[in-house]
Image (tube, rainbow, N blue to C red):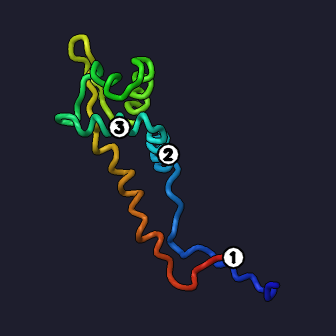
Amino acid sequence: MGTGTDDCRTPDEGRELLPLAEAEELAAVFKALADPARVRLLSYLAASDDGTACACHLPEALGISQPTLSHHLKKLQTTGLVTREQRGRWAHYTVQPAALSAVRAYLQLDDRLAAPTGSRCC
């Protein structure tokens, strides 16, 4: 049984929630990367010369149909992870590393996870 005292501590002063707009942007990127085919696609593009590849090579490389490829590329493009450039008949997709900078920064949780001794709540 408890001692009858409320030992739940309030958050440290100055600690704030991630701003909603930033959280929504990060969530959109995480959602886009929540599909293994998109992770593979992004990895394939990143490993290509200049981070760019023609869409004509992608279905065979990934073992997916053209409509499925188009769907996945649209999701990656919508979140800004890749850009599309039409070159004649074919579209070329290029990885945008800057689009992942916010994700990289967010994932640097080391400092935020290092809780001081005795700061457990409830």
Q: Is residue 87 above or below residue 6?
A: above
Q: Residues within 10 Å of mark 3 (few under 14, many from 20)?
A: many
Q: Is residue 36 above or below residue 8?
A: above
Residue at (41, 57) in percent of width and height: 106
Residue at (36, 57) in percent of width and height: 105
> Amino acid type of disc 2?
Ala
Observer-nearest residue: 89 or 119? 89
Locate residue 99: give its quadrant: top left
Residue with the mark numbered 1: 122
Residue with the mark numbered 3: 81
Q: CA distance from mark 3 to mark 1?
A: 40 Å
Residue at (39, 33) in percent of width and height: 76
Residue closest to the far bottom: 3
> Amino acid type of disc 3?
Leu
Residue with the mark numbered 2: 27
Secondary element type, mark 3: loop
Return the x and y of residue 93 as percentages of the image width and height. 28, 28
> Amino acid type of disc 1?
Cys
Q: Is residue 98 above or below residue 5?
A: above
- Decide which of tag 1 and tag 2 comes sooner along the chain: 2
Q: CA distance from mark 3 to mark 2?
A: 13 Å
> Horizontally, is 69 left or right of 54 in the view?
right
Q: Quarter of the image for the C terminus: give it.
A: bottom right
Observer-nearest residue: 122 or 1? 1
Q: Quarter of the image for the N terminus: give it.
A: bottom right
The answer to whether mark 1 and mark 2 are in CB contact below 8 A is: no
Q: Residues within 10 Å of mark 1 (few under 14, many from 20)?
A: few
Secondary element type, mark 2: helix
> Horizontally, is 92 left or right of 77 in the view?
left
Return the x and y of residue 116 as percentages of the image width and height. 50, 82
Locate residue 54: give its quadrant: top left
- Decide which of tag 3 and tag 1 comes sooner along the chain: 3
